[in-house]
Amino acid sequence: MNTLVSTGSVLVADRLLVPGQPSIRCQAADAVRGHLRRRGVTPVTGPLQVLDGTDRNFAAVLPGTGGQVGLGLAAAEHDPTGQAIAATTLAAWLAVARPRTVLLASPRSFCAGVARAIEVVERLLEQRDGPIYVRKQIVHNTHVVAKLRAAGAVFVDELDAVVDGATVVFSAHGVSPAVRAEATRRGMEVIDATCPLVTKVHVEARRFAGRGDTVVLIGHAGHEEVDGTLGEAPERTVLVETVDDVANLVVDDPERVSYLTQTTLAVDETTEVISALRARFPALRGPGSDDICYASTNRQDALTAVAGDADLVLVVGSVNSSNSLRLVELAQRAGTPAHLIDDAGDIRPEWLAGVDVIGVTAGASAPSHLVEAVVTTLGGLGPVTVVERETSRETLHFSLPATVRRS
């Protein structure tokens, strides 16, 4: 029998049960469930018997990579609205089912700083009995945060939600000196998961301000990394986001101007802003090495090698992930339609119409298993040929904070 479907919900099959045959996997089920949720329908998941008079079933069997794949939905017998939704949903996905090539950009997914920050929280949860507080999201990914929260981590926006003397982890994006001072004043045990490349920018901010420069920080207002860097020398630092901001910039001494950048910016756009700064302030000084981190640069280079040959680009990452958003914008500037998706459930059938080649990548804070799930989902709509294009290989590893290692 099929999983019971109540009125108002629609069953999305995870496998089709055909009498006398092995069950058929429905690899696109995640995308189908997401489609229903966007329509305000509650999806339930389970096997679907293709020949069953109990429920009204809508199913199809397609050729897949190495075998058959299925699409299946069902609604309650006395739910004509649900039946209509099931029918139109199946039709929408069948209309875009076809063989495809997936171009995987490499590197993609976690960078060394993200992996380190996540491991810090995981180890603390294993080592400590008391609550482990994390100020802000440890990294900007909803799946990572949800997993750590389920394991016991307590995420807070500010330290006023943390009890005095508790253990608190500072996220990979860093914090201002004012936040550190508050934690010290309240006797908190601080475990600093700030990415070392962000820490480098903080050190530069203090050094540049200390020699009397106006420090121009190129970045996005409101981003946690930017807030932390601005806090290092707030009286000497100004924020610019665009070339237009540079034109309106006022400084104390045009001969004493330095610049820094947020680590997750788009390289091409940042270069334009730096060029504008040099044109206005010929004596401009900058860091000894680029502040945009190796991971952001590598992922942008890898996507550039893919986007020109793709009909569509899918970037796995959350909406508050700066480096993921920059990847979407990079593909769009290359003339390729691109979308940011948290996971396979965000894929929309209309994006796939007429699309034969899909470029897939992930921001530095997105787990690799989400990319694998996207490829699997696309394979539920027809045979998929996966081609990986590697432009560089990352071997960098950051050591854990000493307190965590000792524990």
Image (cartoon, helix red, strand yellow):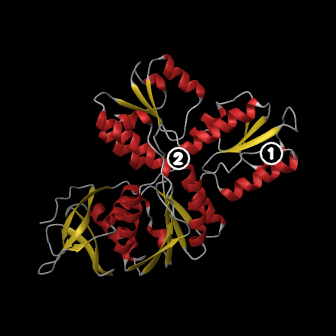
| Classed neighbour count for the residue bearing mark 2: other residues with Cα under 10 Å, few (<14), some (14–19), many (≥20) | few
Q: Amino acid at mark 1?
A: Val
At numbered mark 1, what does the secondary structure look like: helix, strand or loop? helix
In depth, the one of 96 and 314 nearer the eye is: 314
Find residue 252 and report its horizontal and vertical position in percent. 85, 31
For residue 134, the mark is none
Answer left or right for 4 relative to 329.
Answer: left
**Quadrant of the image containing the C terminus:** top left
- Find the distance from the CA under tag 2 to the CA under tag 1: 25 Å
Q: Across the whole image, how many numbered discs are drawn on residues?
A: 2
**Quadrant of the image containing the N terminus:** bottom left
Q: Earlier in the sequence, mark 2 or mark 1?
A: 1
In depth, the one of 304 and 396 nearer the eye is: 396
Q: Residue at x 46, y 78 (%)?
A: 101
Find residue 183 and report its horizontal and vertical position in percent. 49, 22
Q: Amino acid at mark 2?
A: Asn
285 versus 192 height, above or below:
below
Residue assigned mark 2: 320
Find residue 171 and report its horizontal and vertical position in percent. 48, 38
Answer left or right for 2 relative to 62.
Answer: left
For residue 246, the mark is 1
